[in-house]
Image: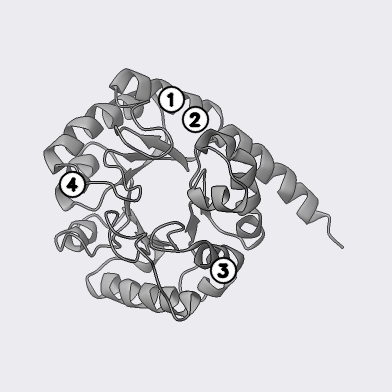
């Protein structure tokens, strides 16, 4: 899954693709690099980020979705926690909704998804909100608590008519977690498979890499690749990344080596 931020303030590439023509060029580059899903977001969810009005998100998203869909056959995911934004995107061909609030922010989202039975939904774990999530996050047992969260959220979805086969879970690396919390989750993704077989992991360029080895955002490719190794070995279905070409090569080589283990 390649990341396409059409925002002014995303932590990694804010303002680079806010213009539709530049966003479409970047989408084409990712498709050339064999991306399988493009995740488009019109609202930054970095720590401390402020909400963006729904009408502004829609104004940013629709030309990009239409432009990509008119030129390419590619699955599009929309990174939003607002039902009105999701509805507008689905109406012009979006395939998946990536909700960092796991359907908690907008009570209309679950019914919208139930009315679109072919639409996939990513449920992400986050302690707090983007505005305050990194203000001293605390857990007694981060793995158990995140597992309990997903059990409750999946039950909620099923009770409202969303199919289990359409549900994907994301442990939310960097969303209300310390470095230790992030590492525990990344190293133990296999513990979530009994809850949901479809798992997404997003570690690309995130600040936990800087805490391990001080580096600017643009210098975190190696750390990003290292952080997904266990996920690949554990059979995680989707990796959400900025550097599509490099991750694609890494996955291919690791898969070939792993296949030869005796």
Visible residue check, residue 239: no
For the residue labelled by badge 4, is the local secondary structure a helix, a strand or a loop? helix
Question: In the figure, is residue 172 to the left or right of 43?
Answer: right
Q: Nearer the viewer, residue 215 or 54?
A: 215
Number of the front mark, 3 or 2: 3
Which residue carries the number 4 mark?
Answer: 87
**Sequence-earlier tag: 3 or 2:** 2
**Sequence-earlier tag: 1 or 3:** 1
CB atoms at circles 3 and 2 under 8 Å apart? no
Which residue carries the number 3 mark?
Answer: 184
Which residue carries the number 2 mark?
Answer: 30
- Binning the other alpha carbons within 10 Å of mark 1 as few (below 14), some (14 to 19) or many (20 upward) gives some
Image height check: is 127 above or below 239? below
Q: Which mark is residue 26?
A: 1
- Binning the other alpha carbons within 10 Å of mark 3 as few (below 14), some (14 to 19) or many (20 upward) gives few
Number of the front mark, 4 or 3: 3
């Amino acid at each position: 899954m390649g990341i396409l931020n059409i925002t002014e303030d995303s932590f990694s590439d804010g303002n680079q693709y806010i213009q539709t023509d530049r966003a479409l060029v970047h989408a084409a580059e990712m498709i050339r690099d064999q991306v399988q899903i493009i995740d488009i977001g019109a609202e930054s969810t970095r720590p401390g980020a402020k909400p963006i009005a729904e009408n502004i998100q829609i104004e940013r998203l629709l030309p990009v979705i239409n432009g990509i869909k008119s030129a390419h056959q590619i699955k599009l995911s929309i990174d939003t926690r607002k039902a009105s934004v999701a509805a507008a995107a689905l109406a012009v061909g979006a395939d998946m909704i990536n909700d960092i609030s796991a359907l908690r922010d907008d009570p209309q989202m679950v019914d919208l998804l139930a009315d679109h039975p072919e639409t996939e939904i990513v449920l992400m774990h986050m302690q707090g909100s983007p505005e305050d999530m990194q203000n001293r996050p605390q857990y007694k047992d981060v793995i158990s608590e995140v597992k309990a969260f997903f059990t409750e959220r999946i039950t909620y979805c099923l009770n409202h008519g969303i199919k289990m086969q359409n549900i994907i879970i994301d442990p939310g690396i960097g969303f209300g977690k310390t470095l230790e919390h992030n590492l525990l989750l990344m190293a133990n993704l296999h513990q979530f498979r009994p809850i949901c077989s479809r798992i997404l992991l997003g570690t690309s360029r995130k600040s936990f890499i800087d805490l391990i080895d001080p580096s600017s955002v643009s210098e975190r490719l190696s750390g990003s690749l290292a952080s997904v190794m266990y996920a690949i070995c554990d059979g995680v279905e989707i990796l959400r990344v900025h550097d599509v070409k490099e991750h694609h090569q890494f996955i291919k080589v690791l898969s070939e080596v792993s296949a030869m283990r005796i």
